[in-house]
Image: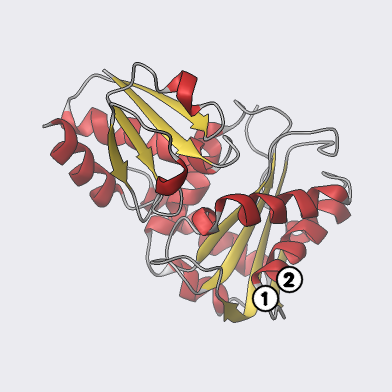
Amino acid sequence: MKIVAVCGAGVGTSGILKVNAERALARLDIEADVTASDVASLATTAADAQVILTSPELVDKIPPTWADIVVVQNYVDMAEIEQKLFDALG
Amino acid sequence: MPLPPLTEASVRLGVPAATWRDAVRAAGDVLIAAGSVGVTYTQRMIDVIEEFGAYVVIAPGLALAHARPGEDVLADGLSLVTLAEPVSFGHAHNDPVSVVIGLAVTTADAHVTGIADLANAFNDPELVPALSAAATPSDAIALVLHSTSRGVS
């Protein structure tokens, strides 16, 4: 299972999403590899991903993909992230 | 190496900002004054938002202004600015913004956990209003540290 957390610059915000997704997956007892990426390299980094995590502001910038796109509004709300990952993967 | 800690010099309270650009500039000014970044970094933080939109508003009332590593990033740096009046960044859910964190990193992989721990302090919904009311930089730092211990896990 591969999950890609996406932001514009590939640092900072995607890093927060990555760490919080890993914490949520641990709580859900789901094994997955979470990678942070910027939008520009997404075509490569998400080629074999099952899930892309991103912001509502960036959805339009994501190229066509087989992955499920999970939109997170509040990057620090663990309850939101856990629920959305559960809905996508559970 | 952990993220550099917030210091009194890296915190500015009640900064007037008419627009989101002013708010980002205030966060950049602190990074410049600390010697963390060159003057071009502030414009690069603005460019990220102009290109990708207001996704940097990662939680209600909180923007994480940042750009990629580059030659103008001299050292990892962190700043925290509270605004005299909240401003809109154009985010559908998390506007208006009253706290801006400025972040500069020398490498893309550095400090991911530290940045998340800092951001997760804002999982405490009382932190943004409390920071807006903070009287001194040391009060603001104490509020962040208090919420950091509550925000993670």
Asked if labels 2 and 1 touch by Cβ distance under 8 angstroms, the answer is yes
Q: Residue at x 16, y 31 (%)?
A: A89
Left or right: B24 as drawn, with respect to A36: right
Q: Residue at x 40, y 23 (%)?
A: A46
Number of marks in the rendered image: 2
Q: Quadrant of residue B81?
A: bottom right
Q: Is residue B74 above or below residue A74?
A: above
Percent position of residue B21, x then y: 70, 67
Percent position of residue A6, x then y: 46, 36
Q: Classify mark 2: helix, strand or loop.
A: helix
Q: Residue at x 69, y 81 (%)?
A: B18
Q: Are marks 1 and 2 on the same chain?
A: yes
Q: Is residue B51 above or below residue A62?
A: below
- Chain for mark 1? B
Q: Classify mark 1: helix, strand or loop.
A: loop
Q: Is residue A45 above or below residue B27?
A: above
Q: Residue at x 85, y 36 (%)?
A: B74
- Chain for mark 2? B
Q: Residues within 10 Å of mark 1 (few under 14, many from 20)?
A: few
Residue B22, disc:
2
Q: Quadrant of residue A87?
A: top left
Percent position of residue B94, x then y: 42, 66
Left or right: A73 as drawn, with respect to B113: left
Left or right: A71 as drawn, with respect to B120: left
User: Which residue in the structure is indicated by mark 1?
Assistant: B19
- Coloration of the structure image: secondary structure
Q: Nearer the viewer, residue A9 or A17?
A: A9
Q: Residues within 10 Å of mark 2 (few under 14, many from 20)?
A: some
